[in-house]
Image (cartoon, grey):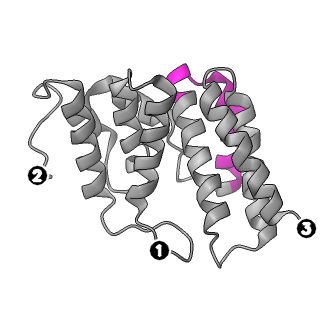
Amino acid sequence: MISALSHRKDEIVNELELICQAALFAAQRHQGQKRRGEMDTPYLNHLAEVAAYAALETKGCDAALIAACWLHDTIEDTATTRQELEEYFGSEITGLVLEATDDMNLPEAERRRIQEDEAPHKSTRAKILKIADKLSNVRKMTEDPSAAWSPQQCLDYAEWAERVVSGLRGKAPVLEAKFDTAMTLARRRFAP
């Protein structure tokens, strides 16, 4: 298990501790991972940004959602299991993470189609998380694109993210406006 993570869900005493424990768990599980791009940015920066966006949208009043933002890629991108998340963070946070988790056994095209189809049916909190995630991804890609992706591939990703976000709209006006700005910048950078 994780030695520095000493608290389980029944031992966490307040919301700030919950968020810090989620950030620590994510940092340990994503250790060494980098984001695509020339700047070799630690993956943890993405998780921090998604959590910060959720905090902005909720005015910091939803600690469980902010914790879930820190944890949202642990099942997809690390060896973390659903059972571990439930042990450490409980069913509420695990449920939010699962709403944002793709089935990595499916081909990428199928995962993308499912995200578009399921977006309107997500809970309000999962919609905030997903918009924050897509916003972070589009902004990062625009500021620091991967050399492995052509401008057309970047534009295709951004437009797919926009279709996902269109199904999530109506619950996160602050993030929706920020996403729209990010899309404008992506189109300027990548459109032929």
**Residue beneath disc 2:** 4
CA–CA distance in space, label 3 to label 1 = 26 Å
**Residue 154 image point, x, y percent:** 73, 63
**Residue beneath disc 3:** 192
Task: Tell me if mark 3 has few (under 14), some (14-19) or many (20+) residues whose alpha carbon lies within 10 angstroms of its own.
Answer: few
Q: Residue at x 59, y 59 (%)?
A: 140
Disc 2 or 1, which lies upstream in sequence? 2
All told, the count of numbered labels is 3
Disc 3 or 2, which lies upstream in sequence? 2
Task: Please say if the residues under marks 3 and 2 sit with CB atoms less than 8 Å apart.
Answer: no
CA–CA distance in space, label 2 to label 1 = 26 Å
The answer to whether any part of residue 114 appears in the image is: no
Quarter of the picture holding the C terminus:
bottom right
Q: Amino acid at mark 1?
A: Asp
Q: Amino acid at mark 2?
A: Ala
The stretch of residues the image draws in magenta is 109-126
**Residue 115 image point, x, y percent:** 65, 39
Q: Residue at x 75, y 33 (%)?
A: 166
**Residue beneath disc 1:** 40
